[in-house]
Amino acid sequence: MANLTITVDRQTLTRARIRALEDGTSVNAIPRDYLERYAGGGGARMRSSSSVGWPWPARPAAVPAGDP
């Protein structure tokens, strides 16, 4: 198993820990489960539904040039 390190602000991590406890999971399990589905070819199914309510789509939407 490989390790992955991310950086988030302290408030975000605190809110994520609280939500994870409420959902019966852990902060570590959220990106692990997401990446397992993403790498496994979840595709459009994964983008439309997520057990943890992932806050963004699998791929960022393109922003047209010139838009703020």
Image (tube, helix red, strand yellow):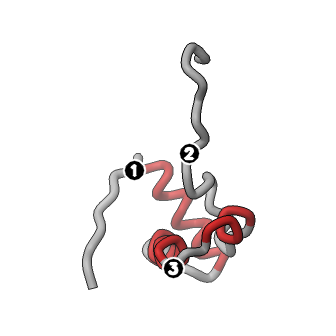
**Residue placed farthest to the left in the image?**
2
* Numbered badge on residue 8: 1
With 7 as the anchor, is 60 left or right in this view? right
| Front: mark 2 or 1 | 2
Amino acid of disc 3: Gly
Q: CA distance from mark 2 to mark 1?
A: 19 Å
Q: Amino acid at mark 1?
A: Val
Q: Earlier along the polypeptide chain: callout 2 or callout 3? A: 3
Label placed on residue 40: 3
- Residue 15 screen position, x and y as percent: 56, 57
Tell me: residue 44, above or below residue 67: below
Crowding at dot 1, Cα within 10 Å, few <14 / some 14-19 / many 20+, comes out as few
Q: Earlier in the sequence, mark 3 or mark 1?
A: 1
Q: What label does residue 60 carry, if any?
A: 2
Task: Say above or below: 51 vs 17.
Answer: below
Give the residue furthest to the top: 66
Callout 2 environment at 10 Å: few (<14), some (14 to 19), or many (20+)?
Answer: few
Which residue type does callout 2 highlight? Answer: Pro
- 1 to the left or right of 59: left
Q: Which of 24/49 is in front?
A: 49
Give the residue drawn at x 58%, y 66%. Answer: 18
Q: Quadrant of the N terminus?
A: bottom left
| Label 3 SS | loop
Residue in the foreground of this view, choosing between 52 and 20: 52
Tell me the distance, in whole angstroms, between the alpha carbons under discs 2 and 3. 19 Å
Q: Are marks 2 and 3 in contact (CB under 8 Å)?
A: no
